[in-house]
Image (cartoon, grey):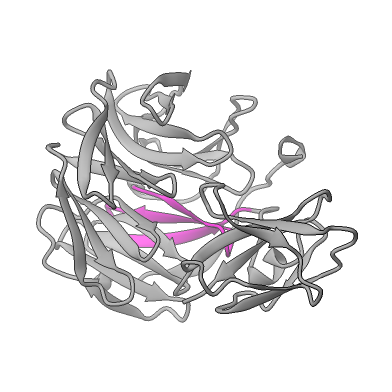
Amino acid sequence: MRQLFTLSFATLVALSLNAQSLTSPESVEYDPAYNRYLVSNSGDGTIVARDQAGVITSFATGIPSGPYGLEILENTLYACAGGRVRGFDLATGAEVFNVNTGGTFLNGIATDGMFIYVTDFNGDKIFKVDVDAATSSTLVANTNGTPNGIVHDPDTDLLWVAFWGANAPVKAYELDGTPGQTFATTLSNIDGITRDCFGNLYLASWTPDAITRLEIASGTQTNMGWTVANPADIDFDAVNSLICIPNTSTSTVTLETVDDCITGVADLSAIGGLTISPNPTTNTIQIANTTNARTYRIMDSASRVVLSGKIPSNATIDVSGLSPGVYMLALDKTAQFSRFVRAQ
């Protein structure tokens, strides 16, 4: 059904970060567990947090070389810093992870729910980081271009990589590093890439200053018409249906609504003919209108099944053992599904 949807123009959300708290912001990462936006300040070696009330606080300081790309995996925020991937506890901001990849300028970062993948802007490489073993390996030894933004597509299990330079391509890679499909563009210097609720890619370019939607099925590319200034490592906030854009040259962050996507947690509870409450939750969820379903599956953002079983007679499922994040609940033998948020 995804290909049947057509997104209209995105409207600017009246949410922006105080420029005095930002110094050359490079990356924005939505944190669903704490319902906030984490922003890397490449100009002063810090990461800040902005809550939904607009209050900006310090998250981590004293980060050498950057930080650049940000990505959350379980309870840790991972950041590109020089040739290293550093990790910070989401609850405290304390550094809990530090691995030297051997790269020179790590820029983009993504996860498939198990591993971290980072692009080496200067080395034309992609590294794979095993966070459990605290090791790094080379996934792609030569990208034949300057890789920048990277995002994982859970539907196809592909890594999509956006490139810097004139007429910059967007390339797909299997998780073993095998190259796949390539899209040509007329954009120059694509910095960031993200993916919306329908599987469309969004590209942040410096020439022109623009966010461009790329529909994978058709190859159609559409300039969204948003006002940006050297947009960098963008993110998609799946809970609030927002494209999060760091504007490097103006030291601002803007949030743009993707029309027809899921907008708000309330809507998360009602898609696919299924209602979940409470949403967000910290302990249990209750399912309404389950029709004839007998079993369920819960999948994480990487489409991995993390919980499954028979639907209890009271239609209540204990999700307290899941890590904070956004999940998909699907009822077997029916077309019913819904997303929910496991909060901190």
Percent across and percent down for residue 239 are: 57, 63
Q: Nearer the viewer, residue 100 or 241?
A: 100
State the residue at coordinates (39%, 32%). 161
State the residue at coordinates (25%, 43%). 107
Percent across and percent down for residue 199 are: 59, 40
Specify whether residue 91 is painted magenta: no
Which quadrant of the figure contains the N terminus? top right
Specify whether residue 255 is painted magenta: yes
Q: Nearer the viewer, residue 264 or 158?
A: 158
Q: Is there any visible trace of residue 266 in the rendered image?
A: yes
Q: Nearer the viewer, residue 198 or 99?
A: 99
Percent across and percent down for residue 2 are: 71, 40
Please indicate whether residue 285 sits to the left or right of residue 159 in the image: right
Q: Nearer the viewer, residue 222 or 129?
A: 129
Residue 176, compared with residue 272, is above or below; it is: above
Residue 163, compared with residue 196, is above or below; it is: above
Percent across and percent down for residue 130 are: 28, 45
State the residue at coordinates (27%, 18%). 144
State the residue at coordinates (11%, 67%). 62
Q: Is there any visible trace of residue 183 in the rendered image?
A: no
Please indicate whether residue 56 sits to the left or right of residue 344 in the image: left
Magenta region: 233-258
Quadrant housing residue 279: bottom right
